[in-house]
Amino acid sequence: MSFKKHVYQAKDLVAGYDDRIILDHISLEIPSNQISVIIGANACGKSTLLKTLARIIKPTSGEVLLDGQPIHKIPSKQLAQVVGLLPQSPIVPEGITVADLVGRGRFPHQSMFGTWSRQDYEAVAEAMEIMHITDLANRHIDELSGGQRQRVWIAMALAQQTDILFLDEPTTYLDITYQIEILDMLTDLNRKYGTTIVMVLHDINLSARYADYLFAVRQGKLVAQGKPSEVITSELIKDVFGLDSTIIQDPISNSPSVVPIGRYHASGTIPTTIGGKVHVR
Amino acid sequence: MIMMNTLSLTHTVELIRLGRISRKRRWLIVTGILAILTFALCAAMLLLGNTIYPVRDVVAVLAGEEVKGASFAVGTIRLPRMLAGLLAGFAFGISGYIFQTMLRNPLANPNVIGITSGSSAAAVFCIIVLQSSKTVTSIASVIAGLATSLLIYVLSRGKSSFSIGRLILVGIGIQAMCNSMITYLMLIGEEHNLPAAVRWLTGSLNGVRMDELPSLIVTCLILVPLICMLSRPLMMLELGEQAASSLGVRTDPVRIMLIASAVILAAIATAITGPIASVAFLAGPIAVRLAGAGSANSIPAGLVGAVLVLAGDLAGQFAFTTKFPVGIITGIIGAPYLLFLLIKLNRRGDF
Amino acid sequence: MERSRLYPKHFTFILIVTIALFIVCVLASLAFGARWLTLSELMEGLKTLQSDTVTANILEKRWLRTIFGLCCGAALGIAGVLMQSVTRNPLADPSILGVNTGAALFVVCGMAFLRISTPQEYIWFALSGAMFTAIFVFGIGSMGRGGATPLKLVLAGAATTAALSSLITAVMIPRTFVMNQFRFWQVGSVGAGTWDSLLLFLPFLAVGALVAIFCAPGLNALALGEEAARGLGVKTGWLRFVAAFAGVVLCGATTAVAGPIAFVGLLATHVIRLLLGPDLRFLIPMSALSGAVILTGSDVIGRIIGSPGELEVGVVTAFVGAPLLILLAMKVKVRSI
């Protein structure tokens, strides 16, 4: 099954707020049809990078290109049919039903009058099925729990049926069960539809597990990129997070897992993995 | 794209469709009832009064004929009063709805944040000091409304992000200043009598004349369709800047157009009737409660505003032994709701 | 607390300036009016106050008005300080919190329904109105998380003021006699007083001032925080209640004799606080002094720009005080969206 390919690049991005520069000459290319995660310490610029890539922030210099065209030159509605964003703290209007909210994701595809076509209905229905919220269709948002609400928001972004989806910390504030659930659902999306996903995640280990590709940011500069197994090393973790750590192989997913070394509880022995099993000397 | 299990998909689509149809039906019914109610109140405004003229006389006057007695009472007094009430109510209603939706807070509306008092002060200034014509007064009122909005925005912006609390505090201050100015202007204009004071401080339909209305009519005819065209982008803006932007809404031009339209509508209405208390504040929440959230509710909000003003004026004229101007009635209705809202927002932890 | 200085910086200088302004305002208040007196006429008149000359008569009326202005201004200044300390809210001003409007509403209702007309009666109605409104506003403002934050109190106050103002107008409109009485009460405002009503007012002012001075050390401690104050041995519950009570009484009494006047508390305290710092032992008397200056000054301005009629002093103070509110709003920490 061949998925639609796009070339999404950032060239020499410089961006910030007021007079503070946050992104310092970043260039990258997002791997098409894969899940990429941007990692870094707080206030390193990862959220700013995501927003600049998603056209929320206009860069001071440099440009972001979709298939060779600068995204700021592409008409908004047209771009919105290809690129979607799930913002970090979405605002939920009171009293709205789940189906209505998910339906708003169809805005870029609809005319001024907003009548729903067959395709709109199907897109919304599919999005709700992927996120397992079909039985909530006519419920009011206010009645839902935090985890359910987040799924509704993601469904709205899915209903937009974009080829590329940016998500700004989609799992923060959620219980670990929901975190795994949502990351699994996003993986479904990527495997079944080939959606290119770019996320900012807080949890380094979940990032390493779910990402096909990682971008590591420190103080506005891109310090490493590549597959998690190549990028996650204790040197990188020290560089990006200032944390001493040792890297082991996650026994479930075989992805690299960061084990932090603090001042306490370090028994002095460094575990290693041999043949997929963790041994402690 | 891979199609999902077709059977379950069709089922989900049906579920969604049925839900949408029932919500749409509710919206249409509510809007229909509001429209009928508005029409009935308009008719009441024309028919009721010291003398009750028969319907055919009223219709004749509307058609342009000369009917003894009725022509003056209906044509010169009641008709402009009714039109002013209808259009100003509609304007205030839509204006309040836009503000509340865009700022995502029911407390943010032209009344509370002082924009209407700025327009009112400008109108009083033009009338008393400059003795200017109606058009100039309307224009000055609009400019003052826009300037006040800009001022309030700039002052409440602060270093960090926008804060609704600061906006309201600044609005309170500006309202106090404008009301002072209005009182002062009326004093030097020797119009320091209660009717004039009430009109410019709380709003009234007394003494409105036909020649004051064209600016309001024209503005409504231009801006209301514009707002209707922008109502879907407004629905996206409701979800926040970032979400709207990612959905393809050009947020800056849309926001500016919507806020400017809202301010202009409120300002022009204020230039004629004064800042009718509470209408901009109440219309939006009532409309949303009746017609349901999730759809574009500008028209219902406008209709609720018209109903409030017309009903308030009728009540003020006929329900009590003394005549009260509409602003007093709506002010008294709005006050408990404002307090109730504060209590609810406090409990919810919004402040 | 540092005890490196006994007096705030530049205290003597500021005190002298304030007293100088005070004297200027008093002289201005005596000199300006329907007929302006020159300085020499003024001096002459002051000497021959007991006689029956035209100048002496004018002066006698203006003396009354001036003293009224000074006393009311002082009362509002002290009330402002007390309320700000008790609520730990820089925006607390009796007019913003709706207390003045509540007092006015009760008086107007008394005028309309019970036909009261003497200052003695006004005072009791005004005091009850002030009391009820303070409790009401504080109640609403305290609901929800965080208790009575500055923003919530001001919002509750503004909403209550709006509500009560509508009611006042609604009661007044059908009753012209009430309107006239109200206007007389308000515009004459400081000028409608007689020596009797001044004598009636003075005890309230005196008691309020004394209570404030007694509470000053405790309120200083309260400014450090609830727990810190209790740790220092201050009975915070009682202190709050007594100080708030005194504040409300001062406003109520002022509204009773002079009608509702806005923003004086805010203006008086903040200027002084900026100059002299937060020590209440100085803040209270200086706010009283500056409140007196502000009110009398505003009254003079109202007379000048409103002549030959006059502009209510409340209108002037609102125009001057509102920008201060805006400035404070820009600085106060409010939760942002």
Image (cartoon, coloured by chain):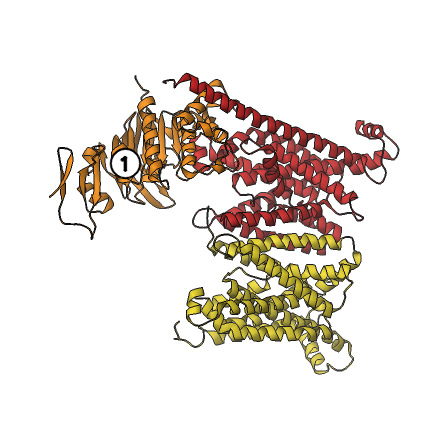
Q: What secondary structure is found at the residue carrying circle 1? A: helix
Q: Position of residue A9 (x, y in %)?
A: 30, 29
Q: Which chain is yellow?
A: C
Question: Left or right: where does residue A2 sit relative to residue C38?
Answer: left
The residue where tag 1 is placed is: A207
Residue at 40% across, 71% down:
C1
Q: Position of residue B351 (x, y in %)?
A: 50, 50
Q: Position of residue A54 (x, y in %)?
A: 37, 33
Chain B rendered in what hue?
A: red
Question: Left or right: where does residue C222 sit relative to residue B283?
Answer: left
Number of numbered discs visible in the structure rendering: 1
Residue C119 in the image: above or below residue A90: below
* Residue type marked 1: Ser
Chain A rendered in what hue?
A: orange
Q: Residues within 10 Å of mark 1 (few under 14, many from 20)?
A: many
Between residues A149 and B41, which one lies in front from this camera angle? A149
Q: Residue C132's image quarter? A: bottom right
Between residues C319 and A190, which one lies in front from this camera angle? A190
Between residues B74 and A268, which one lies in front from this camera angle? A268
Q: Position of residue C104 (x, y in %)?
A: 68, 61
